Image (cartoon, rainbow, N blue to C red):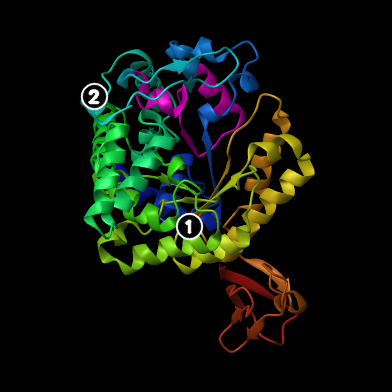
């Protein structure tokens, strides 16, 4: 999407959004653009990572292997998914997933393909430092070319939504090329070497690295190479005509327990910053990095605010996603995260995990999504909600319930010109607490949730008419 076209879309969305109280609705693309610019859209936004959804969930006749080389089947499956679940944004379109869509197979990473399971890599190809010389950016061929073709066709056939590339990021790319274990070992050697207090200790580390086929500063050099590969892969997308607007960089493997927050900020974040600068004009949706507590998110926000060099990337990622613990459980106090994001003026993405979508009742799913949506509206914070993945044994109607709850409770627009009795005027419509009513200024303020409204009428009338609201 050209810069001029993007600018026109944003202006149009902003104008329509000012009229949302009069029934004007945004398109999914307009809604997600406003969310990503940290502007309040008409309702809570939604996103689906297509390849996180088992193909049989949508079409029982298809397997993973059916989709590996067939562009049309991928496109048709994506369109079926969107017709059933009209999310505002779709990402990770190719059912080979982010690994094949990032060109790892074409870089030389071996994969195992089965009919009923997600393609998985079977070995790392950087055993020693010299192997780095054999790694080159992916050529536009094979699975990688299939993924690019799928993106182009979906972007062309579903222009009303945001279709965004999903790329494996620097550290996570290294985990697949080098292996997570060896990459962390390289980092440990580098840390020990730079912190060594004697020449004798340094020689011991050098000898240890030599036995591994590396050297003490190998980690720095390989991370630079991995980052260059990510840039080159993104360039392939652009060369193929793919619109990178809303692109997402997948950095899951840099999350705890692999790296703590300080390590992430020291060794990974500088690479993310460079990637961010390269795509800033396209408004990336963010980096999928998962700190494991609200307070660790605060550390990241503080870091971005205090270091002005990093101020453009204060959103880390642009729409932050809440983490899961080692057991795969959702450790989320969404209200706490929404308060944190409100404090730092950042949008928030709430993730509903697959086990919950599969095992919870429709009522429980509805209530969970309702709580998040209502908290978003109360805080006046741009929020996006996503079901992280859908297994083929998930009841499809539960996903209908998910979208129903978002639409019914995630509306940021209040009806215009509502008539309220004097008693209703004294009760906040958001949190039901007692409001401060000033007839002289014709205003209502809720001390609890800061809801504000202007009304017409005076204390001698039996009712008042709400003419403007802000929550």
At 28% across and 22% down in the image, what residue appears? 138
Left or right of 329 on screen, residue 80: left
Which structural element holds mark 2? loop
Q: Please tell me whether residue 127 is drawn above or below residue 10 in the rendered image.
A: above
Residue 454 makes an appearance in the image? yes
Front residue of 372 and 6: 372
Percent across and percent down for residue 10 are: 35, 49
Q: Secondary structure at mark 1?
A: loop
List x then y, in percent, for residue 83. Answer: 58, 27
Does 445 sit above or below residue 1?
Answer: below
Among the 4 quarters of the image, the one containing residue 400: top right
* Residue at 62%, 21% in the rendered image: 58
Q: Is residue 148 magenta?
A: no
Span shown in magenta: 76-105
Vertical comparison of 367 with 425: above or below: above
Task: Check the image and name the residue furthest to the front.
Answer: 200
Residue 234 image point, x, y percent: 28, 32
Point 34% across, 41% down: residue: 186
Figure quadrant of the C terminus: bottom right
In this figure, which residue is indicated by the disc labeled 2? 136
Image quarter where the N terminus lies is top left
Residue that mark 1 sits on: 40
Please indicate, yes or no, whether residue 283 appears anywhere in the rendered image.
no
Name the spot of residue 453 as percent of width and height, x first. 58, 74
């Amino acid at each position: 999407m050209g810069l001029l076209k993007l600018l026109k879309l944003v202006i149009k969305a902003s104008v329509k959004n000012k009229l949302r109280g009069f029934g004007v609705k945004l398109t999914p693309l307009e809604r997600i653009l406003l969310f990503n610019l940290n502007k309040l859209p008409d309702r809570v936004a939604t996103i689906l990572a297509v390849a996180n959804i088992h193909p049989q969930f949508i079409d029982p006749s298809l397997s993973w292997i059916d989709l590996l080389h067939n562009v049309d089947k991928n496109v048709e499956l994506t369109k079926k998914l969107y017709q059933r679940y009209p999310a505002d944004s779709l990402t990770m379109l190719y059912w080979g997933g982010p690994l094949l869509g990032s060109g790892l197979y074409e870089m030389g990473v071996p994969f195992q393909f089965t009919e009923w399971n997600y393609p998985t890599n079977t070995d790392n190809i950087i055993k020693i430092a010299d192997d780095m010389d054999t790694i080159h950016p992916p050529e536009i061929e094979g699975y990688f070319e299939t993924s690019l073709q799928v993106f182009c066709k979906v972007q062309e056939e579903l222009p009303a939504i945001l279709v965004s590339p999903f790329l494996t990021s620097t550290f996570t790319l290294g985990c697949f090329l080098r292996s997570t274990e060896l990459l962390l070992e390289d980092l440990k050697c580098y840390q020990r070497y730079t912190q060594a207090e004697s020449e004798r200790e340094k020689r011991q580390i050098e000898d240890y690295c030599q036995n591994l086929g590396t050297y003490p500063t190998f980690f720095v050099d390989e991370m630079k190479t991995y980052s260059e590969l990510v840039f080159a892969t993104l360039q392939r997308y652009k060369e193929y005509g793919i619109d990178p607007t809303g692109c997402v960089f997948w950095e899951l493997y840099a999350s705890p327990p692999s790296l703590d927050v300080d390590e992430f900020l020291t060794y990974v974040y500088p690479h993310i910053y460079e990637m961010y600068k390269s795509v800033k004009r396209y408004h990336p949706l963010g980096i999928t990095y998962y700190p494991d507590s609200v307070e660790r998110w605060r550390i990241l926000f503080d870091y971005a605010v205090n270091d002005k060099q990093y101020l453009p990337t204060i959103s880390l990622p642009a729409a932050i996603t809440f983490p899961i613990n080692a057991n795969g459980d959702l450790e989320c106090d969404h209200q706490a995260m929404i308060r944190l994001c409100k404090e730092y003026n950042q949008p928030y993405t709430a993730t509903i995990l697959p086990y919950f979508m599969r095992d919870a009742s429709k009522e429980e799913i509805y209530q969970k999504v309702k709580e998040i949506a209502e908290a978003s509206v109360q805080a006046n914070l741009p929020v996006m909600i996503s079901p992280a993945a859908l297994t083929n044994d998930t009841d499809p109607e539960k996903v209908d319930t998910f979208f129903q709850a978002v639409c019914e409770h995630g509306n940021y627009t209040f009806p215009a010109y509502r008539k309220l009795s004097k008693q209703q005027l004294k009760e906040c419509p958001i949190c039901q607490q007692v409001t401060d009513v000033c007839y002289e200024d014709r205003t209502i303020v809720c001390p609890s949730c800061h809801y504000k409204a202007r009304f017409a009428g005076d204390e001698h009338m039996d009712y008042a008419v709400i003419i403007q609201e802000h929550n």
